[in-house]
Image: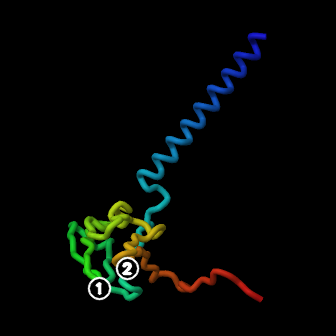
C-alpha cells in the first residue's frame, strides 16, 4: 500500500521538475533571443508613416545609439531611438503609448506600430545574396 504512494509521489515530483525545467528553458531562450538572430545578414529598419516610406536605417552598421523625432501630420511626435542592432520608440505623446511599451525590436517577427500617429517600424533582412527573393505564399490551380 505504501509502495504505490511512494511511486506516485516520485512520478509527481519528476513531472513537476520537468515542467519547471521546461519553463525555465523557454524563458531563457525567449529572454536572450536564441533562434531569432539575423544570422549575419544585414538588418534594415523601415519607417513608414501613412503607408509611405520615411526612411530606412541599416541597424547592422549602427555603432552608437542616437535618437530622432518623427512628427505626425495631425500633430504629435514620436522619439525614435536607434541602437546597434535594434530600434524602438523611446517617447511618444499619443494617449495609449503602446508603441513605447513594445520596447526595442531586433527581429522582423513583430513591427512597432503607433496607430494614433500612423507610424510603423518594420525590420527586414537584406537578402541580396539570394537569387530568388520572390516566394509565393500560395499556389492556386
Q: Residue at x 22, y 76 (%)?
A: 69
Residue 85 in percent (x, y) is at 33, 66
The residue beneath circle 1 is 73
Q: Are marks 1 and 2 in contact (CB under 8 Å)?
A: yes
Task: Give the number of marks.
Answer: 2
Q: Choose top left, top right, bottom left or bottom right for residue 52.
A: bottom left
Q: Nearer the viewer, residue 40 or 11?
A: 11
Disc 2 secondary structure class: loop
The residue beneath circle 2 is 118
Disc 1 secondary structure class: loop
Callout 2: few (<14), some (14-19), or many (20+) C-alpha neighbours within 10 Å?
A: some
Q: Nearer the viewer, residue 77 or 134?
A: 77
Q: Choose top left, top right, bottom left or bottom right for residue 15.
A: top right
Instruction: Please tell me which of labels 1 and 2 falls first in the chain.
Output: 1
Specify whether 110 is left or right of 87.
right
Rendered position, 131 above or below 87: below
Q: Residue at x 66, y 22 (%)?
A: 10
Specify whether 123 is left or right of 132.
left
Amino acid at each position: 500500500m505504501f509502495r504505490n504512494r511512494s511511486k506516485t509521489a516520485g512520478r509527481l515530483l519528476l513531472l513537476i521538475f520537468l515542467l519547471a525545467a521546461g519553463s525555465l528553458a523557454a524563458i531563457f531562450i525567449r529572454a536572450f533571443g536564441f533562434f531569432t538572430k539575423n544570422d549575419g545578414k544585414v538588418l534594415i529598419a523601415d519607417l513608414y508613416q501613412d503607408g509611405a516610406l520615411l526612411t530606412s536605417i541599416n541597424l547592422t552598421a549602427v555603432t552608437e545609439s542616437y535618437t530622432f523625432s518623427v512628427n505626425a501630420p495631425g500633430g504629435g511626435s514620436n522619439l525614435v531611438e536607434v541602437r546597434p542592432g535594434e530600434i524602438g520608440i523611446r517617447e511618444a505623446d499619443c494617449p495609449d503609448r503602446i508603441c513605447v511599451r513594445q520596447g526595442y525590436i531586433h527581429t522582423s517577427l513583430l513591427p512597432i506600430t503607433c496607430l494614433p500617429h500612423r507610424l510603423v517600424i518594420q525590420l527586414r533582412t537584406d537578402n541580396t545574396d539570394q537569387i530568388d527573393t520572390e516566394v509565393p505564399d500560395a499556389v492556386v490551380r
